[in-house]
Image (cartoon, rainbow, N blue to C red):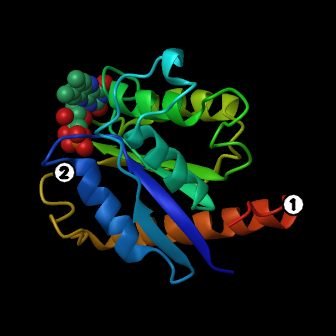
């Protein structure tokens, strides 16, 4: 079955390693998954004062999430947790109360870092957040990608064959997970 997947890149940096990883994942995804980036850099810092009237970037975020059937988080680790910008975007998307965009929307988490832990702690932290947001999370396989220089080109070409194969398998398993979730739950309205 075909699904639309929105992906959020946790980094706002121009030269982001995680953006390169996201490009690779788009290239390696099975044909059934149509992948589109969900940007969030123009969001103001969230407060519930906005709940009565979301500003345009926040509406755009909510609309983009409503239009996809699954979400992929591709995030760096900042200070052993997720970047503030990504947390801010999630806080926006989870509100107003009762209109949480992640409810029953399957998701997966992946990330890369030059460090040995490959964003493991950021991913663990994000799992707690998304669990509370009631997103069915892919538990396995996990993907902690240590970014060695040149591992992925700016165009998203993976230079190491075993990493390429692993990432291809990751996307294949995400497709299977989305399918599994939607055999149990009704699909969201288009
Ligand atoms: C980092 N970095 C980092 N790396 C890591 O493995 N664990 C960490 O806790 C942190 N903490 C951290 C905090 C801040 C504020 C910055 C700017 C960086 C290094 C980080 O992995 C590296 O900068 C990557 O390039 C970030 O990914 P993007 O932004 O290039 O996708």
Q: Is residue 93 left or right of residue 75?
A: right
Q: Residue drawn 68% across and 37% down?
A: 99
Q: Is residue 123 left or right of residue 114?
A: right
The residue at which mark 2 appears reads as 148
Residue 177 vertical position relative to residue 101 in the rendered view, above or below: below
Label 1: how many Cα within 10 Å (few below 14, some 14–19, many 20+):
few
Does residue 96 appear in the picture of this structure?
yes
The residue at which mark 1 appears reads as 184
Q: Position of residue 92 (x, y in %)?
A: 50, 31
Q: Residue drawn 50% across and 55% down?
A: 64
Tell me, yes or no, whether the two marked residues, 1 and 2, touch with CB atoms within 8 Å.
Answer: no
Disc 1 secondary structure class: helix
Q: Is residue 186 left or right of residue 135?
A: right
Residue 9 vertical position relative to residue 156 in the rendered view, above or below: above
Disc 2 secondary structure class: loop
Q: Position of residue 119 (x, y in %)?
A: 38, 36
Mark 1 or mark 2, which is nearer to you? Answer: 1
Residue 49 vertical position relative to residue 17 in the rendered view, above or below: above
Does residue 147 appear in the picture of this structure?
no
Residue 25 vertical position relative to residue 86 in the rendered view, above or below: below
Label 2: how many Cα within 10 Å (few below 14, some 14–19, many 20+):
few
Specify which label sits upstream in the sequence, 1 or 2.
2
Q: Quarter of the image holding residue 187?
A: bottom right
Q: Is residue 150 or residue 57 the one in the foreground?
A: 57
Q: Position of residue 184 (x, y in %)?
A: 87, 60
Q: Quarter of the image holding residue 48?
A: top right
């Amino acid at each position: 079955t075909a699904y639309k997947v929105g992906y959020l890149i946790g980094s706002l940096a121009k030269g982001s390693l995680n953006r390169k990883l996201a490009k690779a994942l788009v290239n390696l995804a099975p044909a059934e998954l149509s992948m589109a980036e969900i940007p969030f850099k123009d969001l103001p810092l969230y407060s519930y004062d906005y709940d009565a009237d979301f500003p345009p970037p926040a509406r755009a975020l909510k609309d983009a999430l409503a239009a996809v059937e699954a979400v992929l988080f591709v995030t760096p680790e900042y200070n052993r947790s997720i970047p503030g910008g990504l947390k801010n975007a999630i806080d926006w998307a989870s509100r107003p109360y009762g209109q949480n965009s992640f409810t029953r929307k399957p998701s997966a988490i992946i990330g890369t870092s030059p460090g040995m832990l490959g964003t493991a702690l950021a991913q663990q932290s994000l799992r707690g957040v998304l669990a509370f947001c009631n997103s069915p999370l892919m538990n396995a396989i996990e993907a902690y990608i240590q970014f060695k220089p040149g591992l992925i080109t700016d165009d998203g070409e993976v230079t190491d064959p075993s990493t390429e194969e692993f990432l291809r398998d990751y996307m294949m398993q995400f497709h299977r997970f989305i399918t599994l979730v939607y055999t149990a739950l009704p699909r969201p309205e288009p």
